[in-house]
Image (tube, coloured by chain):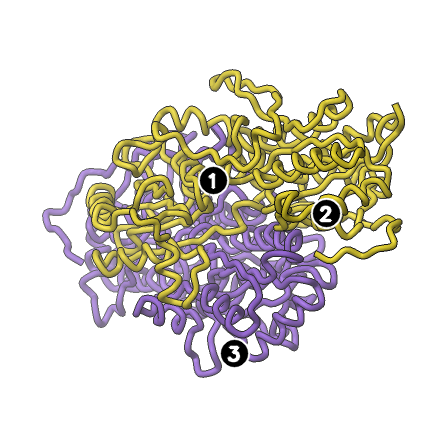
Chain colours: A purple, B yellow
Amino acid sequence: MAIKNAFYAQSGGVTAVINASAAGVIQTARKYPDQIGKVYAGRNGIIGALKEELIDTSLESDESIEALIHTPGGAFGSCRHKLKNISENAREYERLIEVFRAHDIGYFFYNGGGDSQDTAYKVSQMAERMGYPITCIGVPKTVDNDLPFTDCCPGFGSVGKYIATSTLEASLDIKSMCDTSTKVFILEVMGRHAGWIAAAGGLAGEQEGDAPHIILFPEVPFNREKFLERVDESVKNHGYCVVVASEGAQYEDGRFLAESGAKDAFGHTQLGGVAPALANMVKQALGHKYHWAVADYLQRSARHLASATDVEQAYAVGQAAVEMALAGKQALMPVIVREQSSPYRWRIGEANLSEVANQEKKMPIHFITDDGYGITKDCREYLQPLISGESFPPFDNGLPRVARLKNQLTEKKLKTEFSL
Amino acid sequence: MAIKNAFYAQSGGVTAVINASAAGVIQTARKYPDQIGKVYAGRNGIIGALKEELIDTSLESDESIEALIHTPGGAFGSCRHKLKNISENAREYERLIEVFRAHDIGYFFYNGGGDSQDTAYKVSQMAERMGYPITCIGVPKTVDNDLPFTDCCPGFGSVGKYIATSTLEASLDIKSMCDTSTKVFILEVMGRHAGWIAAAGGLAGEQEGDAPHIILFPEVPFNREKFLERVDESVKNHGYCVVVASEGAQYEDGRFLAESGAKDAFGHTQLGGVAPALANMVKQALGHKYHWAVADYLQRSARHLASATDVEQAYAVGQAAVEMALAGKQALMPVIVREQSSPYRWRIGEANLSEVANQEKKMPIHFITDDGYGITKDCREYLQPLISGESFPPFDNGLPRVARLKNQLTEKKLKTEFSL
């Protein structure tokens, strides 16, 4: 078997553990020098391949690659660039193959969500059509936990742990002071289409009356009156009310809560304003003193509080991707298979990229309580292992130590520039 | 020396480590059973004393008290209730003394900020006037780091560590994706009158070009044009711009940025909207894609990321308060004295409550760079040790373990109810 180089790229929104997947890919590839030559990483994801901006990871020390395991963000750069269908934009796929050919790349590892798995699949098709042999393996990643076939998505467990912990901690704060101060606290979390992250906030409450008292899911149409009634009830019964609100929370007609709030204030529709919109409702209708927080990027970059389970799984899918490629497999994505919940046992399985592409996994309806504001026992059982275990990074001078890569580009070989 | 009971109360905004001070008080008191009988804690702070709602901490196990060291929030409840001057409201002070007398309380430990130190001082004066012997010792606490005489305030170091870490982590996220996605990220932090917390965000940047690129302090008048220019410059030079904005950031004429923003949107003036207000400016003037986060209570309750230095100091001031009381001292507050910065050495000193009361310590002007947007080397040297060291709580099932107290009230002895 001839030695071929590999290409690895990060795609879409980054996570606290996507670099652990990168480490899984690179460290595993380094174990097979007779099969895999260099691992090139795309500078800013797939755009790096299109522009022939290939980071030569062989110039990074073993220590630097190891440090990726505890470094959040995307160490090689990621991008939001979705390749169109081959019929609409064959040119981009052809360019990819040209670049791969020029750099003798025989393995393509694409680390991302649904769109990226779709791209990886299309690259495998185009390569076949163009007669260029390349193994395409997807590496799953998404904080939204919305990929099909896999029990969970690397990246999600750590966000879940962060949101559950933050909900618990902030709740103790509000509870301390609710008699004379803030009575309602609203934490806005990510999840535009699926309520997985908001659901994880529910793990903070273990006993009757514990926060969070209300979870707002995108899956459950928002009803203003019912919501306010529940807030008031919680303040009456427990002295305070903690709300975990998904950024994707929406009215029955599909309007986002954030949208309406943000439009009033700033004349635009970017999401990210559910918390102030809800706070406004509470203030106007009930008059309770409130506070709100928007976790935004803090939640998906909080490597300092990553779930050990998540870190392990993120690494494992990177490692498995390389092993699958070396075993001659094609157009697959390693997935997490849950063998049992308690005690938690999981293993790596396989899914076909052709089936993964562009499917979204929503919360099962039996994970949400009948009133629409909480999580069920089944949901807890599902979520619990995913946030389990701690994987603290090393700290220097009070701050997490992060990888500082050289990120040196390899020399271009093609004569043509490519414009996106 | 006769055995006397002690009264301990938490006051004002709680912190990630105020319960460590409580543990310092209670554990130290338990070492001197021949001098200190029971430690009563005020239910919801000083209000508990006024209402004669005294939590009997002797009913809590040693394990529970030890667990306070890693439990955020105020375990006995805190409150925002400032006692007026004795001349205006002698009745409240008299009531306190009555309650203390009824429960044979000879020691008063008041854990709070400037207002609370003022109250502790006034109680000592009133007791003397009423001929009731009670030792009054303040225990410093404030995330705002604004107490005089002490080098730093317990509570601040942990917020600082949280904000510096969050800034670092989120910056890696933005940096990964700025080429095709978010270019400007704004993190709003606490600090209404002093920029200490925002300054701590500055520790995230170590090398030229590192985030944060702009810090907005309450101490430096906000200039819209200069700010936008700097944002654009940072995007041009580094590809992205990270802003850490104090909630107290204000225009030259004293208007809060948050105020104007919040008024537009919701018709009220509560602070907490600096980040969306700034995001709006960036969008309108520059058109860059942005994201913003508001850390709010998450920052002051984040015990999972507490600074070990802060936890130690919070405990130490609680312990020192009891030791000072037993040494016959009166109307003092233990303070942190910095002996040297590197390597960091500190010890406990003393300040007179009469002098502490109602003074606010602002950032020294030489801690802010000449352009008004960064921190100086002196500032770094001051802040660095305060965020140093980790003190992770134990975790169960993926979540921090917290103290679950009984918080049982002792029987009332007074016939009269007191209405606030």
Q: Is residue B105 left or right of residue B381?
A: right
The chain letter for the residue carrying disc 1 is A
Residue type, label 2: Phe
Q: Nearer the viewer, residue B277 or B288?
A: B277
Kindly identify which residue carries mark 2.
B76
Which residue shows up at 48% across the image and 46% down it? A302
Q: Are marks 3 and 2 on the same chain?
A: no
Query: Which kind of residue does numbered mark 1 sit on?
Result: Ile
**Mark-to-mark CA distance, 3 and 1:** 39 Å
| Disc 3 crowd, CA 10 A, few/some/many (<14, 14-19, 20+) | some
Quick check: A200 above or below A360?
above
Horizontally, is A234 left or right of B60 in the view? left
- Judging by the rendered image, the residue that carries numbered circle 1 is A69
* Residue corresponding to mark 3: A221
Q: What mark, if any, has residue A411 been given in the picture?
A: none
- Asked whether, in this view, residue B160 is left or right of residue B7, the answer is left
Which residue is at the front of the view, A319 or B59?
B59
**Residue B182, image x and y in percent?**
31, 54
Residue furthest to the bottom in view is A253
Residue at 80 percent of width and 50 percent of height: B52
Left or right, residue B334 beside residue A283? right
Percent across and percent down for residue A153 are 50, 57
